[in-house]
Amino acid sequence: MATPGPRDRDPADFLRVAHRGASGECPENTLAAFRRALELDAQMIECDLQITTDDHVVVFHDWTLERTSNGSGVVAELPLEAIRRVDAGAWRAPRFMGERVPTLAETLDAVLPRALLNLELKCRGPRERARALARAAVAAVRERTAFGRVVFSSFDAACLDEVRSASDDARIGVLWDRPPFEAAWQRARALGAVALHPRASTVTPELVAQARDSGLALYVWTVNAPDEILRLVRAGVDGVMSDHPERLLAARAALLTERRRDPG
């Protein structure tokens, strides 16, 4: 399965994206969450990438370790060895005790045989750190000949610039938080992006139409209410990110039922 772009399609064929894995029931951004998302037939898994002081790429959302592990400190100011020592699962439930912060390499090898990946690059500080993160992430995907199965996304313009500089083959999604969208379209054109990733509450018929006119897929985040998933898919978005991939499956089932009832 190659990473899809915008298309005329049946609404039931929207891309089902597990946000940080099956984070509604598992510790986010862990291999346990990714495995569960695959069990729930997620077609893509979204996760967050940061770079350590010794230039290893790890999968972690927050700038600091405290919320989702038993560790403390700033991720980007720690070496890999220190980050791998923390427990990233027990905070969620005792059954997840012993889950570690995964590396990018572990994540690619666990997910790509069965699903696509949306890699969100997160970086603060000097431009050279954004460059190091982007180049390491691109190199790991290149090593696996997997550019067609991965989207690199970020809110950070420097990170996306560095991804594009690292590879003409990298597929880029521009993350966007709120209107206006003029700068988002400009950034997407400059980068040769394949997708725009807007906050779900910003989606309007005009945004959907402009994405189509621009040749961009529209992958929205983060949608957990079943009615809202259905509303957005019917409005024409190409993919939905959710903490609950089982709700994406339920939405697909509902849409398929509608199609059978009204095949015209």
Image: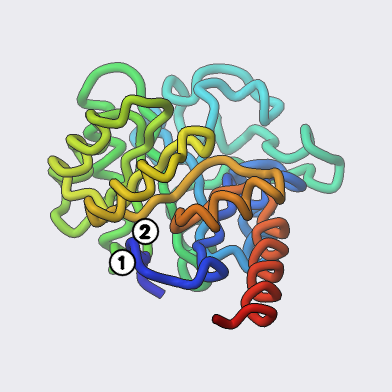
Residue beneath disc 2: 150
- Residue 206 position, x and y percent, is 36, 42
Residue 219 vertical position relative to residue 178 in the rendered view, above or below: below
Residue at 64% x, 68% y is: 255
Q: Give the amino acid at mark 2.
A: Val
Residue at 34% x, 45% y is: 196
| Horizontal relation, residue 30 to residue 204: left or right | right
- Residue 164 position, x and y percent, is 17, 45
Q: Could you give the CA–CA distance between mark 2 and mark 1, rounded to whole angstroms?
A: 6 Å
Mark 1 crowd level (few <14, some 14–19, many ≥20, 10 Å Cα): some
Residue at 48% x, 56% y is: 239
Mark 2 crowd level (few <14, some 14–19, many ≥20, 10 Å Cα): many
Contact? badges 2 and 1 (CB < 8 Å): yes
Q: Quadrant of the N terminus?
A: bottom left
- Residue 18 position, x and y percent, is 59, 53
Q: Give the amino acid at mark 1.
A: Gly
Q: For numbered disc 1, what is the local secondary structure?
A: helix
Residue 148 circle label: 1
Residue at 18% x, 35% y is: 186
- Residue 62 position, x and y percent, is 54, 26
| Horizontal relation, residue 107 to residue 165: left or right | right
Is 139 or 212 nearer to us in this picture?
Answer: 212
Q: Is residue 139 visible?
A: no
Residue 264 circle label: none
Q: For numbered disc 2, what is the local secondary structure?
A: strand
Considering every residue shown, the one lying at the far right of the view is 94
